[in-house]
Image (tube, grey):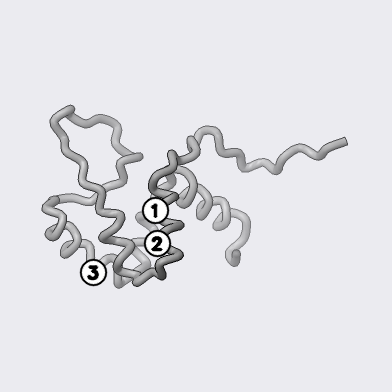
């Protein structure tokens, strides 16, 4: 992966943990311009990461717009299955992700 180890770590945090993807949305014109339409179709006023909420009232209703966003990229059936399995699995806690390489075995 180009961009050095920092970029690779960030990509892993975004894919397998709860790392923010707002930097990607800002760079992807297609995604950024589609967000208002996706929100309207889903009947929501805001799109946020559920992993970055410090507090919410119990009456808050969550609407997962992941499938709507994925459709913007016309993924293959194989990729849809991969994405679906990722969405079903719990993210690895960001606090437990280590930036240090594993210890060498003796």
Indicate whether 7 appears above or below 103.
below
- Residue in view at x 43 percent, y 39 percent: 90
Indicate whether 19 appears above or below 38.
above
Indicate whether 50 appears above or below 21.
above
Judge the density around disc 3: few (<14), some (14-19), many (≥20) Cα neighbours within 10 Å: few
Q: Nearer the viewer, residue 24 or 72?
A: 72
Name the residue tied to disc 3. 33
Residue 44 position in % (x across, y down): 14, 51
- Residue in view at x 48 percent, y 35 percent: 93
Q: Nearer the viewer, mark 3 or mark 2?
A: 2
Residue 87 position in % (x across, y down): 39, 48
**In the displayed structure image, the side of residue 100 where residue 84 appears, left or right:** left
Tag 1–tag 2 contact (CB < 8 Å):
yes
**In the displayed structure image, the side of residue 68 where residue 78 appears, left or right:** right
Residue 52 position in % (x across, y down): 33, 39
Q: Secondary structure at mark 1?
A: helix
Name the residue tied to disc 1. 84
Name the residue tied to disc 2. 80
The answer to which of marks 3 and 1 sits earlier in the sequence is 3
Tag 3–tag 2 contact (CB < 8 Å):
no
Q: Secondary structure at mark 3?
A: helix
Residue 68 placement: quadrant: bottom left
Q: Nearer the viewer, residue 75 or 19?
A: 75
């Amino acid at each position: 992966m180009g961009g050095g180890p920092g970029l690779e770590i960030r990509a892993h945090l975004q894919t397998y943990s709860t790392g923010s993807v707002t930097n990607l949305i800002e760079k992807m014109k297609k995604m950024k311009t589609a967000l208002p339409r996706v929100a309207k179709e889903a009947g929501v006023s805001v799109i946020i990461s559920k992993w970055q909420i410090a507090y919410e009232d119990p009456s808050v209703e969550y609407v997962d717009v992941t499938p709507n966003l994925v459709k913007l990229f016309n993924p293959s059936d194989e990729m849809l299955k991969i994405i679906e399995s990722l969405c079903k699995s719990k993210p690895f806690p960001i606090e437990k992700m280590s930036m240090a390489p594993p210890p060498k075995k003796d």
